Image (cartoon, helix red, strand yellow):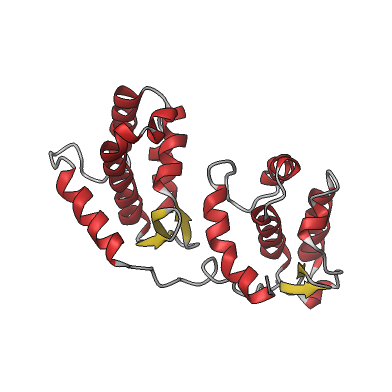
């Protein structure tokens, strides 16, 4: 995979990480990232670490002897690193993050990050016929009484309904529940879209998801969020509220 293909793949990879990691590019998230990377060497973990470093130290993705690397804004005077290599050494990712953060704090000028496609730019949504058909079908099926008003508070009601109908998150994968789960995913995604002023889009393997949410243009896979929401009542409401901040 060449560097440009890698950069174009980062945003979809990070969407897929949301089931296991709070994708907020924080220092606190790196300990969990290392745990995940120790169990699986997929490219999403290196992509996330690279983006986290770039958000604190500016700079851009580069090719380092055939591996995707990141280099900080030149004003910081830091050596480039290969995120995948950092993840093979426990604790190293946080050490490098701290070094980049310290350099950025000491810099007389703020570091500048080169935009990453789909993360720092507002991507155009993919709108194949499948997406339009899916959206229209779910909207027609979902009840339209006053309680379903696409407000963050209505997501507590959605959580209760999911638990009542499915019992636990494993029910989301049962083919017998497909119609209900699709409807719940649509309602959640549409509520997120309205709150965060985003767009529906289509992923070739993951199906419908919502992009361009909030001021930082994040993406959300409704099915992933449904699973997380069933574990903690109030999670979906809180998540939705954060999109409008």
- Residue 157 visible, this orientation: yes
Picture residue at 72% right of the left edge, 60% below the top: 53
130 horizontally vs 61: left or right = left
The x and y percentages for residue 245 are 44, 53
User: Residue at 39% across / 29% down in the picture?
Assistant: 171
- x, y (%) of residue 37? 72, 45
Residue 31 position (above or below residue 243): above
On screen, residue 12 above or below 60: above
Q: Residue at x 55, y 71 (%)?
A: 117
In this orientation, which residue lies closer to the viewer: 128 or 191?
A: 128
The quarter of the picture where the N terminus appears is bottom right
Residue 166 location, quadrant: top left
Residue 214 locus on image (x, y percent): 43, 59
Q: Is residue 27 above or below residue 47?
A: above
Q: Residue at x 32, y 67 (%)?
A: 128
Q: Residue furthest left?
A: 145
Asked if one can make out residue 108 in the rendered structure from this viewpoint, the answer is no
- Determine which quarter of the picture holds residue 131: bottom left
Q: Would residue 40 appear left or right of 170 to someone viewing this image?
A: right
Left or right of 103? Residue 202 is left
Total residue callouts:
0
């Amino acid at each position: 995979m060449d560097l440009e293909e890698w950069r174009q793949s980062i945003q979809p990879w990070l969407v897929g990480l949301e089931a296991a990691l709070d994708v907020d590019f924080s220092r606190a998230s790196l300990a969990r990232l290392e745990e995940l990377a120790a169990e699986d060497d997929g490219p999403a973990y290196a992509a996330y670490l690279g983006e986290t470093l770039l958000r604190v130290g500016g700079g851009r993705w580069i090719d380092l002897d055939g591996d995707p690397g990141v280099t900080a804004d030149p004003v910081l005077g830091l050596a480039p690193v290969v995120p995948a290599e950092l993840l093979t050494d426990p604790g190293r990712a946080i050490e490098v993050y701290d070094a980049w953060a310290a350099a950025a704090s000491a810099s007389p000028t703020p570091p500048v990050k080169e935009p990453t496609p789909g993360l720092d730019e507002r991507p155009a949504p993919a709108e194949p016929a499948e997406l339009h058909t899916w959206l229209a079908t779910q909207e027609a099926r979902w009840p339209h009484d006053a309680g379903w008003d696409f407000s963050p508070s209505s997501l507590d009601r959605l959580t209760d309904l999911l638990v009542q109908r499915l019992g636990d998150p494993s029910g989301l994968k049962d083919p017998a529940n497909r119609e209900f789960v699709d409807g719940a995913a649509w309602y959640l995604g549409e509520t997120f879209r309205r709150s965060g002023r985003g767009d529906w889009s289509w992923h070739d393997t993951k199906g419908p998801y919502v992009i361009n949410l909030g001021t930082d243009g994040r993406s959300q896979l409704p099915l992933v969020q449904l699973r997380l929401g069933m574990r903690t009542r109030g999670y979906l409401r809180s998540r939705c509220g954060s999109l409008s901040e």
